[in-house]
Amino acid sequence: MKKAIIGVLAIIFLFFLGLYVNQTREEGKVEEYSRTEFLMDTVVMVQIFTDDQREAQRAADKMFTVMADLEKKFNRHLEGSEVAAINSRAGQVPVDVSAATFALIERALNYSQLTSSAFDITVAPLLDLWGFADEEQHIPAAEELEQALAFVDCTEVVLDRQAQTVFLPRPGMALDLGGIAKGYIVDQGAEVLQEAGIKSALIDAGGDIRVIGFKADQTPWRIGIKHPRQNSRLAAVLPLVDSSVATSGDYERFFEGDGVRYHHLLNPQTGRPARGLSSVTIVASEAADADALSTAIFILGAEEGRDLLESLEGVEGILITDTEEIYISSGLKGQVEQQ
């Protein structure tokens, strides 16, 4: 009898202990989970606010796996990537690609149309000529530029949606998805986190940033925008909620020759670095859009870039000229903290 009473009391105790543990978990303290990996030639960081660290770890594991798999498809410098296959078979045969690669290339070509080919994914021959692909930069001769420019024309890219193939019609043509792939991969990473039930997170892939929800304290995320000429200073701070930001600048990858800065944001019409702007920051709902538009607007220049920016619904931005003038789009005025 005594043992029975003790057993009942033990069961009651465990029952209430279970209630207490569950209540504690439900009312548990939200903590930060963060992790970094090296992907896409940059440091990728994820910051998650959660009351379940194991759930956050599982979500981050899956996120980084998905992002790494996409990089293996999109990076033209990786042997065996789908883009490398497209380039190696230029002028020969169409190449079967995954749904992700097809969708990304199709999206990139849409941005080429929107920007009058300022955004052009066939600039790979120019990037290689300048040495931005292998770090052996040099100023090419005019004849070399003319030869490389002959292979730059995104309107020649042939997509077959039914067969899901991509074809470059002339040998020597090559794709480089660097102006949009990183943003797209960040978006796919964010989708993984959201599917896992994550409500508050930030993904930063070398400046291509996407935030999910608010911070843990229910305030917007605050994203600092680097000043293109003053390394220790921020040009502005942006409040973000459920949105993305990407910056293209002439200070990211460049070399100097004869006192002139030569950067990797090449104008596909001239083959030379675009001039007039030193930094373009774009805010959009998806990182792929922010990524592509920051590149395109940088190449278009201040005047055309402003016009395009103001014409796009749901897209805002900050343009900094090479004389350090700052333009803030109409939808961001009053929100940006200028430093």
Image (cartoon, helix red, strand yellow):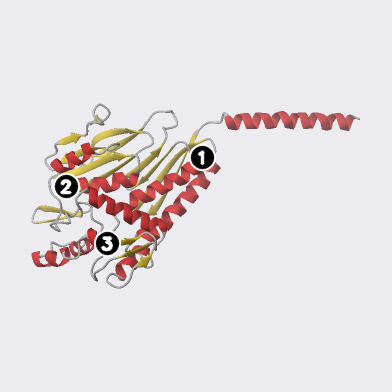
Labelled pair 3, 1 in contact (Cβ < 8 Å) = no
In what element is the residue under mark 3? loop
For residue 197, the mark is 1
Q: Earlier in the sequence, mark 1 or mark 2?
A: 1
Q: Earlier in the sequence, mark 3 or mark 1?
A: 3
Q: CA distance from mark 1 to mark 2?
A: 40 Å
- Identify residue type, mark 3: Val
Q: How dense is the environment of label 2, judged by Cα within 10 Å: few (below 14), some, or many (20 and up)?
A: many
Please tell me in which quadrant of the rendered image residue 307 appears: top left
> Compared to 43, does 4 lie above or below?
above
Q: Does residue 175 appear in this view? A: yes
Q: In the image, residue 265 lies at what x, y percent?
A: 20, 53
Q: Does residue 123 appear in this view? A: no
Q: How dense is the environment of label 1, judged by Cα within 10 Å: few (below 14), some, or many (20 and up)?
A: few
Labelled pair 2, 3 in contact (Cβ < 8 Å) = no
Q: In the image, residue 334 lies at what x, y percent?
A: 25, 26
Q: In the image, residue 97 lies at what x, y percent?
A: 39, 63
Tell us which disc is closer to us: 2 or 3: 3
Residue identified by numbered label 2:
300
Tell us which disc is closer to us: 3 or 1: 3
Residue identified by numbered label 3:
157
Q: In the image, residue 273 lies at what x, y percent?
A: 15, 54
Picture residue at 47% right of the left edge, 44% below the top: 193
